[in-house]
Image (cartoon, helix red, strand yellow):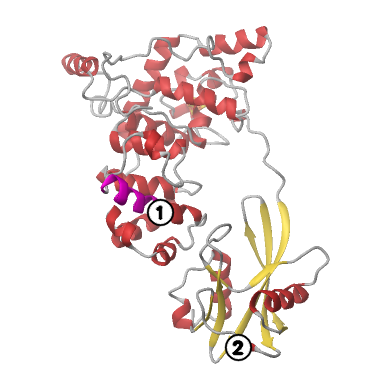
Amino acid sequence: MGEEEGGGEMPRLLPPSFPPKFGADPPRFLAESSPTQRSSAAAQLTLRPQARGEEIRWNLLKWFARHKRNLPWRVHGNPYRIFVVEVMLQQTQIKTVIPYYERWMKTFPNIEALARSPLDQVLKLWEGLGYYTRARNLHRAAQIIVDRFGGKIPSDPEILQTLPGIGRYTAGAVASIAFQKPVPLVDGNVARVLSRIYNLKKDVSKPETQKFLYAIAQKLVPPSPLSSAPFRQRRIRLRRTGGRGNGEGKAKRPGDFNQALMELGSLICIPEIPKCSICPVRSLCLAFQKGDPSRLPIRSKGPEVKKIDMVVGLLRKNGKILVRRRPPRGIWGGLWEIPGTVCLKNQSSEAALAEEFKEGLGLSVTAEKKWSKLKHRFTHRLAFIHPFELKMSGNGKRQRNSAKTLWASPAKLKTLSFPVPHQKILKSIIPHGF
Ligand code: SF4
């Protein structure tokens, strides 16, 4: 999508047809459905079409102006801050992100500071937030923005999507919230809200449904705001007539609208029991009218969570602990770890550790003591991590510090970035030193 979407054309207050029609390019799930199913779906979605789209927009923007949460990144509207927080918010809740965001902005107040910082420092600040690939991508994206774009975050969503770790959702969020581009976004909250408003009985985890949700969101998002003549005229008219609610004039922006959709999903149209009685779009919501919105959205079950056993070994020498750096890619990429491995089927923890230390580090070890196991949930795996205290049984002195291994003192351990379960193990085993 170009930066100047619709440039040259008179911006429209309403799209020519709303909601999107299933005519020339219907989403595949509708094209494949029977004529009866299709006409039924289309009938649901064309109920008071123009009025519905406009009313949804008005009501949401008015509600958002009054009820939006006071989040730290909403104070500034700075593209760099929005860029960083949108990456942090991928897969992570707002209340978890806030302290990380605040620490981040103190350490890396601008894109140049982030780009020139060593990756180790970036990972250390990210420690505990999970999905560390995001931190590595954010660091790399900052370097690209400084090198290729003169330190200015691109406003074009197509260009944003060329940066590492930036997909359609994040590009839409940055372009609309930071630059007021009329670009849609669909995250889990938006998918739930739109599925309910339009009573969409299709699996939202399927690509064709996502495509359709994006088509609806695109039609709903307001045009770029204050440059739009019809919008200006309408604002003037509203001011003269007293308007339709407080904050409406200020809030007529793509970024506000996208945030309003997400905020509604976070605060009102929540997963289990939506708070329909206080919802600003209740009168327009088909699922509410049908009487059972909580059964939407439809989402197919993800792959079965597999259980795995992992084992880690604490090896001490002269008050120091042997730690190892993980490869830059993959799970916990680039972080430090207590050396260990995944146990194979029918392999004992002790045997798995001895093999890993021998083959991976050239050390002969035996397990001396077993500590309590802990659980850690990966996206599709539930890991049981078994920590052991180890004893060297041979050539330990030959294991020297390198880029990948380190005998770390308790003070040094504090400066390294570890995955959350390894932090927990270190804290529980050496609570005064870590
Ligand atoms: S009326 Fe209920 S189901 Fe519909 S959008 Fe509002 S909260 Fe969600």
What is the quadrant of the N terminus in the image?
top left
Tell me which label, 1 or 2, sits earlier in the chain.
1
Q: Which residues are magenta?
A: 138-150
- Front position in the image: 219 or 257: 219
Element type at mark 2: helix
46 versus 119 height, above or below = above
Q: Quadrant of residue 326?
A: bottom right
Element type at mark 1: helix
Q: What type is the residue that disc 2 sits on?
A: Arg
5 versus 263 height, above or below = above
Task: Give residue 426's position: percent from left, percent from top.
Answer: 55, 76
113 versus 354 height, above or below = above
Whether residue 259 is visible, yes or no, is: no
What crowding class fits label 1: few (fewer than 14 Cα within 10 Å), some (14-19), or many (20 or more)? some
The magenta stretch spans residue 145 = yes
Q: What type is the residue that disc 1 sits on?
A: Arg
Task: Give residue 19's position: percent from left, percent from top.
Answer: 46, 14
Q: Residue at x 46, y 46 (%)?
A: 165
Task: Give residue 21's position: percent from left, percent from top.
Answer: 50, 11
Instruction: From the image, tell me which residue sits under label 1.
Output: 140
- Front position in the image: 259 or 322: 322
Q: Quadrant of residue 415?
A: bottom left
Instruction: From the image, tell me which residue sits under label 2.
Output: 398
